[in-house]
Image (cartoon, rainbow, N blue to C red):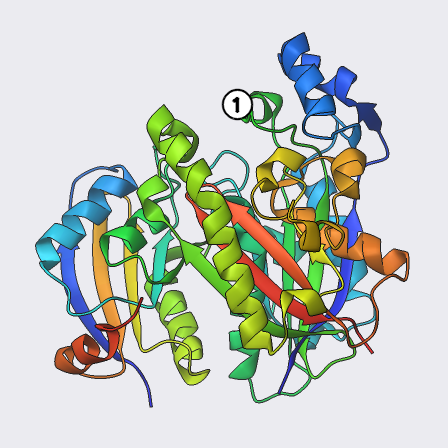
Amino acid sequence: MTITLDAVEAFFPDRVVTVEERAPALGFTPAQTHMFRRVHGLDRMHSDPELTQDDLMLPAAQKVLGSTDPRAVRHVIYAHALHGGRVADSGTAAHLRDMLGLEHAAAFAMTQQNCAVPLSAIDVAGVLLETDPDPDAKVLVVTGEKLPDPVAAAITTILVADGAAACLVGKDGPGAPVRSFSTRTRGEFAAGLAGTPEQFRAAAELRPVMVREVMDEAVARAGCTLADLQFIIPPNQGLPFWQGTLDAEDLLEKCVFENNARYSHCLGADVLINYRWLLDQGRLEPGRPSMFLATGLGWTYSAMVFEGAR
Amino acid sequence: MSLHRETLSTVHAAGPRPHGELVDDLLDHAGPLDGRPDLVILTYDEADTQGALTIASHLNHRTGGAAHSFGLTGVGPDGGAAAATIAEAYHRAGRSDYALVAVIDGGSGVLLRLSAGSAAAIESSTRSRP
């Protein structure tokens, strides 16, 4: 049995702003604004102050369900990066399920990995499906967080924008087969943004090592090599974030970095947004492996190898 | 075969406490663990008062740092049961033999071990993991 990404959809509000419009609105200085553009590679992004959490997370979920028999959806997983009640609360997953008309499904939220959480959610969806006797059973994974400006302003390493994505996970379905998953957590950095400068520096120094470790393990488990990958799909966390790993000559050409400039960082939704973007352009070769990468404060590093849908 | 479920420790307090304190108390009361879990789940319904801290990662770190760890919320009082369902699924998929679940509820907490074998077997099977 193979776990498949049977449908992936993304959603953005219509309103688009530039770095120079968004950064000052969040209280960033001209120097920080300049850094976001020139160093991080940001340009424009979707951001709508009138948008609600429901407005953001529902459309992609509704679209991904499409004509799927609602009774086939066994679980609804809301995967959110920020924990601590700043955006989602304990009722968000059930609220989402009910608004989608999936009252029969079990709903829960996954978190505590920050922006690495979507890959773990897909992995959990996969193991839940493996134990479901119904070959048509599905799990819906939904991402997307509408941050109030004070919360967005507290994230100083990148500009957070509005974007959401949803993924319908099935087994032996028509979508992209998932070939492997690898993850590591280094909990000595659990303090995240509240950590000391020394912890921040140590985590930054360790990041290339850990990212490479999960990448190597993921391709080994998938039975391929990094050279075999068509694309490496990281989150849109800014270009400097990947120094020491994805800037290697043999990897750089495979990396999907274009959407830093187009969408900026939409927290846990980025990798699915970038996947949908590739799909829309017809660039994913059937049967050829590609890799999702995700990292999250705290720190968790994950890689997942999938193949282009045939 | 189903996982064997064992309560390692419990803590109780009158009011809400930071999740990190509760997790540390649970681990301190449990004493040294046999082996290292390969799956760590922190489940809670009320968000942590110290929300910047990633307590699932901290729990993972304190118990060997070798686990796939995450938080599970939105399942009301059934957090432990929901976590157990996921742990069982990982076990049946051949990907977990030793899950550690911390259930936080306000000022109270329970630390559960879901394991495929006896403590001695866990120690033997996990000792050589990287």
In the rendered image of this protein, does residue B8 appear above or below residue B45? Answer: below
Does the image show residue A80? Answer: no
Which residue of the protein is positioned furthest toward the top in this rendering? A30
Q: Tell me the amino acid under the disc marked 1.
A: Ala
Residue A32 position within the rendered picture, expressed as x and y whole percent measured from the top left? 63, 15
Toward which corner of the image does residue A78 lie, by quadrant? bottom right
Query: Residue visible at 19% across and 46% down?
Result: B24
Q: Nearer the viewer, residue A295 or A118?
A: A295
Is residue A130 found left or right of A197 in the rendered image?
right
In the rendered image of this protein, does residue A212 appear above or below residue A307? Answer: above
Is residue B127 found left or right of A295 in the rendered image?
left
Residue A307 position within the rendered picture, expressed as x and y whole percent measured from the top left? 72, 72
Query: Residue visible at 41% across and 43% down?
Result: A298
Q: Residue beneath label 1, please?
A: A154
Does the image show residue A215? Answer: yes
Describe the element under mark 1 as helix, strand or loop: helix
Q: Which chain letter matches label 1?
A: A
Q: Nearer the viewer, residue A131 or A41?
A: A41
Query: Residue visible at 74% across and 80% down?
Result: A173
Query: Residue visible at 19% across and 72% down?
Result: B6
Is residue A81 found left or right of A62 in the rendered image?
left
